Image (cartoon, coloured by chain):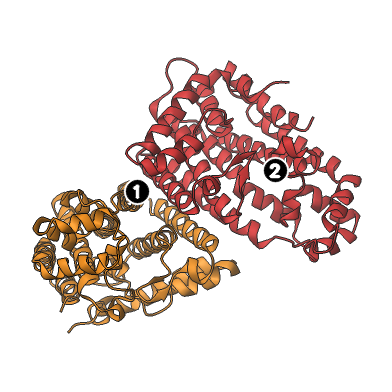
Chain colours: A red, B orange
Amino acid sequence: MTTATQLLQPVELDLEALLSDLRGLIGAGHPILQAAAEHLFSAGGKRLRPGIVLLISRALTPEGELPIKHRKLAQITEMIHTASLVHDDVVDEADTRRGVETVHSRFDPRIAVLAGDFLFAQASWHLANLENLEVVKLLSRVIMDLAEGEIKQGLNRFDPKQSFASYLDKSYCKTASLIANSSKAIGVLSDVDEEHLNSLYLFGRQLGLAFQVVDDILDFTGSDQQLGKPAASDLGSGYLTAPVLYALDENPFLSELIERNFSEKEDLLKALAIVRESNAIEKSRELAERFSSESKDAICWLPDSSAKNALLDLPEFVLSRLY
Amino acid sequence: MTTATQLLQPVELDLEALLSDLRGLIGAGHPILQAAAEHLFSAGGKRLRPGIVLLISRALTPEGELPIKHRKLAQITEMIHTASLVHDDVVDEADTRRGVETVHSRFDPRIAVLAGDFLFAQASWHLANLENLEVVKLLSRVIMDLAEGEIKQGLNRFDPKQSFASYLDKSYCKTASLIANSSKAIGVLSDVDEEHLNSLYLFGRQLGLAFQVVDDILDFTGSDQQLGKPAASDLGSGYLTAPVLYALDENPFLSELIERNFSEKEDLLKALAIVRESNAIEKSRELAERFSSESKDAICWLPDSSAKNALLDLPEFVLSRLY
């Protein structure tokens, strides 16, 4: 099975330089944030988002060095993503993320607020200095989508009447918007025409949605160790995702369990069993496969290169986490 | 004595419309944030920052309606200011601000993080849609200054060796940058020439610094009731401001008290007495007067109007809080 590291091999050195820049940027002269920066930008993270931006840059710039603005955009993407994770963990009171302690739990919620604000601020400053209004608009839309996504997610907790469309909308805001808009923004910086800009956007959007649906499936099928958090922890917190929404169509009793916030003994286990025994996981997998295949189709026009091949493998890689 | 309401009279209706827009914007469809929005944008606040932006707009547009972009910029200014206050209160663990409960204390730190992020995100989105790269740069610099100012303030706590320059730098970042850069940005939107842009910036910068120094003096001379917080609360938290830095030149014993974090009985009272009995308050007042007069001088070129008169009265008004 391909690993993320293998997949990102065409931009491995670019990613290393990017992470080293980020550690320097946030840590410089701010001992309070230094430790948080080391923690956030240490080696080991997959860095899929800046990896995707760099791969698209390479695919659009087949020869020579990547332009500095393209590198900056990849950096901005990772800053926005990290800032949003750090603040979401405060809002969600999450103690770990993928098995690693969160900033607010390891340090202090106040440091987490400060570190997130600092990263958002740096991102918005570097963004303005790319000197491209179209790119500023695309990425500021992402920052708004991230904030709105977090609010929407909170509003829909424990609501079995929420529509599938609202789940997809929340998933777009929280996961797909960043990948979609940063993919498109790289196209803007590379003077790609409107039609191909839209296909770069679509590539990122469908990839992000596939990624989110796979994540949501794993909440039901993964082991605690694989997830870095207890199984069905999203469900327990009242976040209703694709598998739950599909299962609700098959078994109305699930709705009762959710509406009483799993307050009675074994409610959560019963709900977990209902989802696992229904066709919901299979339907969710089909949904993820559809998104993944649409993502792949969107970028067939890119000129041949190892970067293009990696991009084409990405949607498959996202699905492979299910097997 | 002139009140803020009298001073802002030329833009009173503009300010009311702005606040009503802001309440609608943040509350719409988000019941969680609705209460926080009511709390943040209720009537009663002085709204000096958007007031200044609107006054400059009026002074530069003597006839007819204010352009929509000018109004939007005033709104963005207030959003950035409020977002930064809400997050600073979390970081500083402040329970009240000017006598009113903070969002994180009245609601929850998580709501405060969410509300601040939402406001920053809205600000950055509306900013991008002003379609003016120069303005985007000026205001994104403000967002960065605010984050850096909060970090600098934290770094320098209880450090009697900090320079006066670093105090002014922190004050610029936390208070003056927003007023300076938004004043300049209104000039950019009004196609003012470079020389006058710089004088608008200087007006805002010196006004902001005067405002901060006055605030810092009041921490020593104001009553608890006047301040909406206990006297010398900044000093007690280790934030060393103009009066303390001047007093340190006169009395080295103050340094000892600070270095041991006022840990012994009556340390804080002793420090307070040293500052009050020195020439520090007088020197700080002279500093504030200098900033105030420089601020006034910077905008003498504006065409005559009631808005210009209000702007010229502002630096004086800031000082009047001392008497």
Q: Quadrant of residue A65?
A: top left
Residue B7 in percent (x, y) is at 22, 78
Residues under labels 1 and 2: Cα distance? 34 Å
Residue B23 visible in rendering: yes
Q: Which mark is residue B144?
A: 1
User: Which residue lies at the image location 32% right of the left edge and 47% below the top edge?
Assistant: B137
* Chain name for mark 2: A
- On screen, residue B76 versus residue A83, left or right, reads left
Foreground pick, B259 / B48: B259
The answer to which image quadrant residue B16 occupies is: bottom left
Q: On residue B315, which mark appears?
A: none
Position in image of residue B87 (x %, y %): 43, 59
* Viewer-closest of A202 and A195: A202
Left or right: residue A285 compared with residue B305: right
Density class for disc 1 (Cα within 10 Å; few <14, some 14-19, many ≥20) is: many
**At numbered mark 1, what does the secondary structure look like: helix, strand or loop?**
helix
Where residue B125 sits: x, y (%)?
Answer: 45, 53
Q: Where A19 falls versus A181 (above or below)?
A: above
**Which element is circle 2 on?**
loop
Q: Which residue is mark 2?
A: A229
Quarter assignment of residue B50: bottom left
Look at discs 1 and 2 and give the one toward the viewer.
2
Q: Quadrant of the N terminus of chain A?
A: top right
| Residue at 85% over, 46% down | A280
Q: At label 2, which amino acid type do we have?
A: Lys
Kindly identify which chain the residue marked by label 1 belongs to: B
Q: Position of residue B163 (x, y in %)?
A: 17, 49
